[in-house]
Amino acid sequence: MTATVMLLVLAGAALHAAWNVAIRAGGDRRQETALLSAAGALLAVAILPFLRQPLPAAWPHLLLTAALHGVYYALVAEAYTRGGVALAYPLMRGTAPLLTTLAAWAVLGERLPPVAWAGIGGICAGVALLARRRGEPAERTAVLFALANAVVIASYTLNDAIGARESGSPVAYTLWTFALSAVPTLLWLSRFGVLRRPHRVQALRAAGGAACSIGSYGLALWAMTQAPVAPVSALRETAMLFGLVLARLVLGERPGARGWAAAGAIALGAAALRLA
């Protein structure tokens, strides 16, 4: 992996953390999530006409992933309504590869090398540290929402692994995911009365967050054409550490020694799973 590829992968990881911070930065996290989802759909729709469209075999997977992403965004909103980025983000992002790996082992019979088991141990240790964190009842509920969302992330990851291959156009497949997932997301969040006309700062934050989300994926996809997939995926797990840094600088969150240790253990464990 060249230095240029490495720097761009790190930039993509930082962008992924940034859109999570953008949601938490707003006063109403449900509205912020709704706005980001809508902005992502608009950006995707603007780009899609210029791309080769997914093959028919991919559409059942697209419809399923749109529904799963709707649940994902709803759980993101609920987690950040109750807890900070430093708490919820490592749990959501780090536990998902653990669940995906265990599912592949249990259901598909895939063999796990020692480095994978070491990664599983690291993630479990980090999750235990965060889950045992003493805090307000709302923070404990945020932990539950974050862990539930890890299950959703693992589910749509497995589904998209099949759908993207069958699509014949992985970029268009991903952009359709952004476009379609806005429908269930906005329907769900409308129950809370959050679909109000945004003011200028909210609109800019939503547009920036959506651009970060799409840009993060685009950089990862490009990097995987320039370097082996495993190290690129492993390096992207630095997003968890970027999340803590941005939460500290932008939101004033103080994860403390326990939070840093937990996020580091989860990031290293997830990276080990990617390299396994």
Image: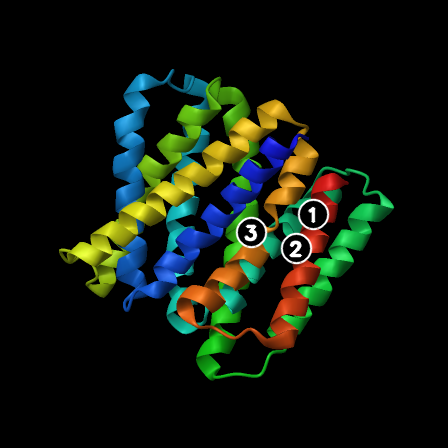
What residue is drawn where x is 13% and y is 55%?
A: 197
**Which amino acid does the dot numbered 1 rest on?**
Ala
Residue 218 in view: yes
Q: 25 and 101: which one is in front?
A: 25
Q: Quadrant of the C terminus?
A: top right
What is the x, y in percent for residue 39?
27, 43
- Number of other residues with Cα within 10 Å of mark 2, as a class: few under 14, some 14 to 19, many 20 or more: many
Task: Compute the Cα span from label 2 to label 3.
Answer: 8 Å
Q: Residue 204 versus residue 190: which sits nearer the camera?
A: 204
Q: Which residue is mark 1?
A: 271
Q: Does the CB distance between marks 1 and 3 fall below 8 Å? A: no
Query: Which residue ends up furthest to the right in the rendered image?
Result: 114
Mark 2 lies on a secondary structure that is helix
Q: Position of residue 254 (x, y in %)?
A: 52, 75
**Hey, what amino acid is under mark 2?**
Ala
- Real-space Cα distance between discs 1 and 3? 11 Å
* 22 sits left or right of 242 in the view: left
Alpha carbons under labels 2 and 1: distance apart: 6 Å
Q: Which residue is mark 2?
A: 267
In what quadrant of the picture does the N terminus appear?
Answer: top right
Q: Would you call the spot at circle 3 few (<14 residues within 10 Å), some (14-19), or many (20 or more)?
A: many
Q: Please name the residue shown 32% across and 24% down the image.
A: 48
Residue 89 lies left or right of residue 41; in this view the side is right
Label 1, residues with CA under 10 Å away: few <14, some 14-19, many ≥20: many
For the residues bearing labels 2 and 1, Cβ distance under 8 angstroms: yes
Quarter-of-image position of residue 55:
top left
Q: Which mark is residue 239?
A: 3
- At which x and y percent is residue 186? 26, 50
